[in-house]
Amino acid sequence: MKTQYHVIIVGSGIAGLSAAATLAGHGLDILIIDESGHTGGQLLRKTRLKPSYFPKFESDLMKSKGFDLVRTINKDPDIDCLFNAQVLGIFKERRLLVHIENIKTHGKQNSEKIFEVQAENLILATGAREKYLPFKGWTLPGVMSLGSAQILMKSYGVLPAHNTLIAGTSPLMMVLASEILGNRGKVIALLDENSMIKKLTFLPLIKNHWSKLLEGAFYTSRMFLNRVPMLQGYRVIQASGNKGFESAIMAKTTPQGDVIPGTEARFFAGALTVGYGFAPNLELPVQAGCNLEYQKNNGGWVVKVDETLESSCRSVYAAGEITGIAGAKKSFIQGKLTAMSILKKMDKINAGNRKKIFKDEVQRLLSLNRQQTEYASFLNHLCQVPTSAYAAIPDETMICRCEEITMGTIKKNIQQGFDTISSLKKATRCGMGRCQGRICGPVIFDIITALTQKNPGSIGCSLSRAPVKNVNIKAFLNS
């Protein structure tokens, strides 16, 4: 480990890997920092242990590209990778405060340590997390996010349950269902809140995004072959069970998102997985001082960047989901673009024909990036939950699980004038618990929007201060 690097990349998902692979071979000292124990983010997690029905077909083409990027990075001696490490803060002149676990020194195992490292150029590729629509019983054991269920299988070889119920608006629903079937589990039903009419808005985008159509056809055919019921226009309104999840009540919804009385149906399963799209991980960009802007079509609050993907902070770049939720392909493109912007700034491109090739490649990537903006608009429209759904959350439903703040408490305080993220946080302590608002933050933002009908941009987003994640005081003592 050095104390200074030409480039530091925070996040080793597709965006971070793409940037690192593009920078490789140019004589730059590069450091990749990731809080997980592997490269590739959620997309490249360890593959399932049991054989698939289609072992020779990979539905997601970005996975194979991702593994190619990992191989490229592993061959470059100038690239250092730091895993199981968290960036706790970003300070002036791009100084990073890093917390790392399981350090070995002189043959002995030390639990954790904190140190500082500085970047001449910093690329933030911190990805996204799932969003939720709270309902009665959503805190029961056995109710989990789609991504959590994936981690259980990919990293630990454990099914969410023998029988799993899947619901929400997320494109991950079919992916998860396919992975459960591949691990010889059973999917009770796949309940999609979106209607077919809403999905057909994808048709004008087929020309530039045909691979997504093939991917969707692959997952749909797998559901049919395994006789998985696929119901559209249904929403979870309650989960029940004694010591854990046992059943869920679903109800049909109108195109406007209102529950239709009398359409309730109960489904029994061992686990319920839900997902309602994604929210960018903005804690580090906010703490670093990067300007944000609200873009509904890109998933809400995102980092504001110029054409080179440089943020408002000098030499701090943003790539991937934190500039807009659009999936792995956009992350791959933006990772390359940020790297090429840095190479140009550092004068690493020789004159002559190579310079022209470089310029042509940048223009091609910019065009592809604009195409991904089209797909982002469709994806976020598909995942979007109607405001009426948030307004209809029962008062007794827990919203902030860490601080045990209910919907009724939030409603009461909004009515009293605490109708921004920061003011509601001060009034109720919502978002001030162990997760620091990572679970409830996006939900509370949508609740305020639904109840006040205010311009989302005026509601604001959560502030973030160092350390952006919980850390044991022992780590500071060991440093």
Image (spheres, rainbow, N blue to C red):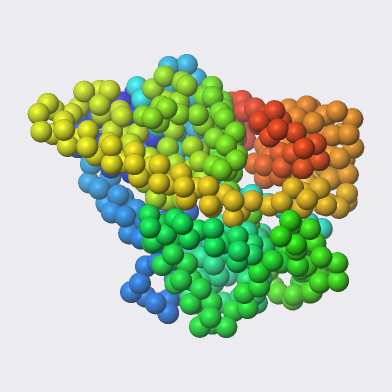
Query: Residue 424's spot in the image, x, y percent?
Result: 79, 31
Query: Residue 291's spot in the image, x, y percent?
Result: 54, 24
For image coordinates 25% across by 26% down, the residue present is 344
| Most distant residue in the top direction | 92
Q: Nearer the viewer, residue 388 or 22?
A: 388
Residue 164 placement, left or right of 288: right
For image coordinates 13% across by 28% down, the residue present is 350
Which quarter of the figure has residue 416? top right
Q: Nearer the viewer, residue 101 or 253?
A: 253
Q: Nearer the viewer, residue 43 or 472?
A: 43
Residue 154 placement, left or right of 25: right
Query: Residue 39's spot in the image, x, y percent?
Result: 39, 49
Residue 474 placement, left or right of 215: right
Q: The N terminus appears in which quarter of the rendering?
A: top left
Residue 91 placement, left or right of 344: right
Q: Is residue 468 above or below residue 46?
A: above
Query: Residue 195's spot in the image, x, y percent?
Result: 64, 64
Q: Is residue 397 above or below residue 228?
A: above
| Most distant residue in the front direction | 204
Q: Is residue 363 above or below residue 241?
A: above
For image coordinates 70% across by 33% down, the residue present is 455
Q: Nearer the viewer, residue 134 or 3?
A: 134
Q: Is residue 116 above or below residue 428?
A: above
For image coordinates 76% across by 67% down, the residue present is 252
Is residue 176 at least partly visible in the picture?
no
Is residue 297 at least partly visible in the picture?
yes
